[in-house]
Amino acid sequence: MSDIRIRPFKWSKDFNQILQVAREVWFADKSHVVSTLNTVNFMLHYMNQATTLLVAVDSSDRLMGILGLTNKVDRPEFRKNRFICCRARFYEHAAKALLYFWPGALNSRLFNELFFANYDRLRKMVPDLSAPEFLVMIVNPESKGMGVGRKLVAAGEEILRNQGFKSYYLLTDSSCDYGFYDHLGMTRAVDVNMSFSIRHVPEYDHYLNCFLRGLVYTQDLREPHQDSAKDQ
């Protein structure tokens, strides 16, 4: 863990690396274009909301992971720079629009729409919606087991403590390594089924019909984490 450094996100240095990692982790697709559009749309949907964006890097400044969070109070990070804000907004909406027209993107677009709708419903079950939220966290697969996830979580929590917050929450689902949050000692406040069935659309590829568990974790910033957390 000694070679892991946490620093603020830098658009020119980190954005393309983040897309590459996110595409590998979440959006592998036979079509490189479709997977890229999905990645841009998904990542910027959350990054555009983040009031804090942190990256974990190694000694060569190679990306090992990213954490985006919002404290619901400050301006989103990208809005502090008009050029980056406009660019990020344009990329997000352009990617979303292209998913409507690009050949072979229908299944991905339908799945994404259901994903965001499910998460919107899940967010309404959060015990305290006014609390800060960890929006997105990804660890580079090449850095698994090195403690990157723990360092990102610790850095994000320290920022929230310094800002005077006493708790936060995050949303995830059973397709992710949610056991990591259990091992950190976070409280699993919500555990419900989410449906991704679109049987009324003939063109939808029904192999994507599935049920995932939607999960809400909360963390009291006044309590230390348990020591049983597996490295991520």
Image (cartoon, rainbow, N blue to C red):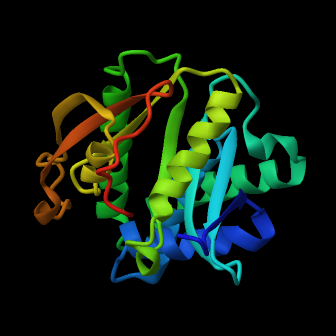
Q: Quadrant of residue 7?
A: bottom right
One can see residue 34 in this view: no
Quarter in which the C terminus is drawn: bottom left
Could you tell whether 189 is left or right of 96 in the image? Answer: left
Q: Residue at x 53, y 16 (%)?
A: 130
Q: Nearer the viewer, residue 3 or 97?
A: 3
One can see residue 178 in this view: yes
Could you tell whether 114 is left or right of 93 in the image? Answer: left
Q: Residue at x 31, y 59 (%)?
A: 230
User: Residue 210's spot in the image, x, y percent?
Assistant: 12, 53
Could you tell whether 48 is left or right of 199 in the image? Answer: right
User: Residue 82's spot in the image, x, y percent?
Assistant: 88, 47
Compared to 219, does 33 lie above or below? below
User: Residue 189's spot in the image, x, y percent?
Assistant: 26, 26
Q: Residue at x 63, y 25 (%)?
A: 72
Could you tell whether 223 is left or right of 29 in the image? Answer: right
Q: How many marks do you count on the picture? A: 0
Compared to 115, does 76 lie above or below? above
User: Residue 160's spot in the image, x, y percent?
Assistant: 63, 32
Compared to 132, does 225 lie above or below? below
Q: Nearer the viewer, residue 157 or 128?
A: 157
Q: Residue at x 36, y 52 (%)?
A: 112
Q: Nearer the viewer, residue 113 or 218?
A: 218
Compared to 230, does 20 lie above or below? below
